[in-house]
Image (cartoon, rainbow, N blue to C red):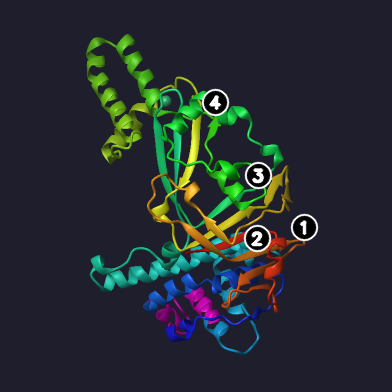
Amino acid sequence: MTEEIERTCCIDKGLQNLGNTCFLNSTLQNLLRLTTFRNELIKHTDFIESSQNSGVNPDYPITRAFVDLLIHMQSPSPRVLSPANLRRSFIRKHRTFANFKQQDAHEFLTLLLDALSEEHGKHLKTVSNDEESSKTRKTTVIDDTFGGAMQTTVLCTQCGTAYVNTATFTALELPIPNEADELDSDQVDDEQTQHCVQGLKLGVHRDYESLHRLATLEGCLARYTYPETLRGTGYRCDYCTLSDLLDRAKANMPAEKAAQLVPIIERAMDTIRAASEGHRAFTEHEMTEISRLVKNTRFPNTPTVVKASALTAEAMKPVLVLQLNRFMSKGRRLRKNDRSVQFPTTLDLSAYCQPGARAHVAYQLRGAIIHSGSMGGGHYTAVVQGKGGGWHNYSDSSVQTDVGDRLESFRPYVLFYERV
Ligand SMILES: [Zn+2]
């Protein structure tokens, strides 16, 4: 069965529209044609084979339907495939997709990847019960293929403490900046912000050049990762809180109680400082102690914080999915931002990664989900690179080949890049 998938070329087939299912078709056309995803799937032969052989009541119904489509994409006929099996398995899990109304392609993509990951996770658990657990994998094919990690640093400008948080993601959701979001000088020139950024305490590069190229994908990424000064957010800095608590303990507490509490507060403050300077992470015990100390303490004031994000180069996976946030709520209504955003076919992410990364982080565009029309009555299509490098446009069952010369005219909603 894996050999069937290994004949890597997907034929330029359309997918039947089952009734407003263009959101599903445009997503599948992109996913099915990602070489690295297909290769990662093949690595997990036991999983896909058990999904294939699990009979009438399969354990992994969504994977099974997906792999079936993948196999049928290789054979010359029929020229149009039906995604009905996949839809059926999917709506059994997500009833809100059971009506034949237009749905959000990005939401479908997210839920589909989650479902595939969940089924693989279930399979890995079954295997680890059978074998020695040290030999078994813990990450799913989705974990290994999509997304990466983003480090977000929040820096308190009052005491200079940095709080670092790293989170993994499957896809990045990027706001599209417009002229109204022009950076005002206060945002970038604030002396304290400059000090923090120059000291690289925030662990980010700055893509100066792209910062003002708003209508480009690089501009969206530059804005997304750019240090931002936030005032009056109610952010609570644990170091400032403890410092305040220390002052009050020394000034107001009975000597005996202060003698007990002061060393504990000072130790907690040292711990936060050491973590802030990157010397070490908190132990669980220290975390508990800090939480206990600051829990019922009045926060002295609301400090101004600088917040910035950077990708972790070493954690970037083979497929990068970028969603341009085109749908936004205005009052009670959803509105579409139809702004044109230029997207490169080769994307270098180094400028948005933490400085000092050794890994080369370059990606090649493989496809996009395009949304045209208005919020309610729009239509989704897929523009995807074929085996020979040409670009084809898939609109449900119809396929328009060689649209590469007008690639720039498409307004992408979700972009799929593969690492090179
Ligand atoms: Zn602080």
Determine which residue is flagged by label 3: 177
Q: Position of residue 386 (x, y in %)?
A: 59, 75
Decide whether the magenta segment is chiefly helix, strand or loop: helix
Q: Which residue is mark 1?
A: 374
The foreground one among 110 and 10 is: 10
Mark 3 or mark 2: whose residue is earlier in sequence: 2
Q: Tell me the distance, in whole angstroms, between the alpha carbons under discs 3 and 2.
A: 21 Å
Q: Secondary structure at mark 1?
A: loop
On the image, the x and y values in percent for residue 71 come to 52, 83
Give the residue pinned by disc 4: 190
Q: Secondary structure at mark 4?
A: loop
Ligand 1, image quadrant it occupies = top left
Label 2 belongs to which residue?
Answer: 104
* Disc 1 and disc 4 in contact, CB within 8 angstroms: no
Cα gap from disc 1 to disc 2, whole angstroms: 13 Å
Q: Quadrant of residue 271?
A: top left
Marker disc for residue 161: none
**Badge 1 residue CB within 8 Å of ligand 1:** no
Q: Nearer the viewer, mark 4 or mark 2?
A: 4
Residue 57 counted in the magenta span:
yes
Q: Are marks 3 and 4 in contact (CB under 8 Å)?
A: no
Q: Which residues are magenta?
A: 47-70
* Amino acid marked by disc 1: Ser
Q: Residues within 10 Å of mark 2 (few under 14, many from 20)?
A: some
Say which element carries label 3: loop
Towards the viewer: 355 or 180: 355
Q: Residue at x 42, y 35 (%)?
A: 200
Quarter of image, res 404: bottom right
Density class for disc 3 (Cα within 10 Å; few <14, some 14-19, many ≥20) is: many
Residue 100 shows in the view: no
**Label 1, label 3: how far apart the Cα atoms are:** 20 Å
Residue 278 located left or right of residue 102:
left
